[in-house]
């Protein structure tokens, strides 16, 4: 097992032990998908909304080139110790900037351009995040949105988000029924 794989296992264990909602973590299958999409798209600069304990961020960062960079945004400052220790174990701490605070407030200060974006925070704001990212996403860049088929109290917000994407002529999209649904959106150009 590589140091990075051991680091990812450490994040999983720490998340299960120290957080109330460990299911929020993407985990190995979705993590590998993010890792491969980052490689396949040859992304150099990436952005993530919703870091949680840093699992998906580590999976994306591990696929970036040496001079690549990931900006990741998280509102909960109590997660920072786990996040930073996991990234150190995975060897990606120098490739990631953690921005603590409300993503809607942080996003206007980030200029990109990004090749890949992962949206995985509060579902009510998915359209806001999407529209903030589109102008700073490279042509041909990817937006991956998690939990787009999640039910319960998020059903309406996510339906609106899915309709918004479907009717947006700037992009093409496929929804994969993995876990609670993942949209892979490509900006044309
Ligand atoms: C589903 S979890 C992210 C999981 C993570 N991407 C992973 O795969 O392990 C959602 C995260 O979004 C964060 N979040 C919720 N609202 C936010 C906001 N307005 N700004 C930034 N982060 C937010 C939550 O604190 C939570 O940690």
Image (tube, grey):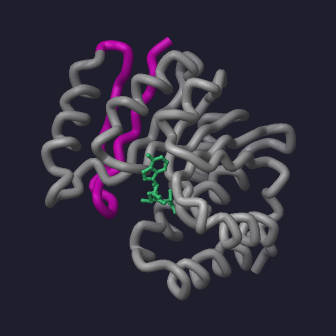
Res 105 seen here: yes
Report whether 68 appears left or right of 142: right
At 86% from the left and 44% from the top, the residue drawn is 66
Q: Nearer the viewer, residue 60 or 52?
A: 52
Can you give x and y, in whole percent of width and height, for residue 147 in the image?
32, 53
Number of numbered discs visible in the structure rendering: 0
| Boundaries of the magenta span | 169-189
- 31 to 71, vertically: above or below: below
Residue 178's image quarter? Answer: bottom left
Q: Residue furthest bottom?
A: 17
- 16 to 28, vertically: above or below: below
Can you give x and y, in whole percent of width and height, for residue 154 in the image?
20, 52
Report whether 96 appears left or right of 115: right
* Residue 182 magenta-highlighted: yes
At 72% from the left and 74% from the top, the residue drawn is 7
Q: Nearer the viewer, residue 34 or 48?
A: 48
Can you give x and y, in whole percent of width and height, for residue 102 in the image?
50, 43
Can you give x and y, in whole percent of width and height, for residue 69 in the image?
75, 40
Res 32 seen here: no
Q: Nearer the viewer, residue 60 or 73?
A: 73
Residue 153's image quarter? Answer: bottom left
At 52% from the left and 34% from the top, the residue drawn is 105
Q: Quarter holding the N terminus?
A: bottom right
* Residue 141 magenta-highlighted: no
At 56% from the left and 46% from the top, the residue drawn is 101
Residue 6's image quarter? Answer: bottom right
């Amino acid at each position: 097992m590589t140091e990075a794989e051991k680091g990812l296992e450490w994040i999983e264990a720490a998340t299960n032990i120290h957080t109330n909602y460990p299911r929020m973590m993407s985990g190995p299958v979705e993590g590998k998908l993010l890792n491969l999409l980052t490689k396949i798209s040859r992304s150099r600069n990436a952005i993530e909304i919703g870091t949680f304990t840093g699992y998906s961020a580590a999976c994306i960062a591990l696929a970036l080139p040496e001079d690549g960079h990931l900006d990741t945004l998280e509102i909960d400052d109590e997660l920072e110790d786990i996040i930073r220790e996991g990234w150190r174990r995975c060897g990606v701490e120098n490739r990631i900037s953690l921005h603590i605070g409300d993503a809607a407030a942080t996003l206007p200060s980030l200029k990109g351009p990004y090749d890949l974006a992962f949206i995985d925070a509060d579902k009510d704001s998915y359209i806001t995040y999407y529209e903030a990212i589109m102008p700073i996403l490279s042509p041909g860049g990817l937006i991956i949105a998690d939990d787009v088929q999640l039910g319960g109290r998020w059903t309406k917000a996510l339906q609106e988000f899915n309709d918004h994407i479907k009717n947006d002529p700037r992009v093409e999209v496929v929804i994969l029924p993995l876990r609670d649904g993942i949209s892979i959106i490509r900006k044309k150009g």
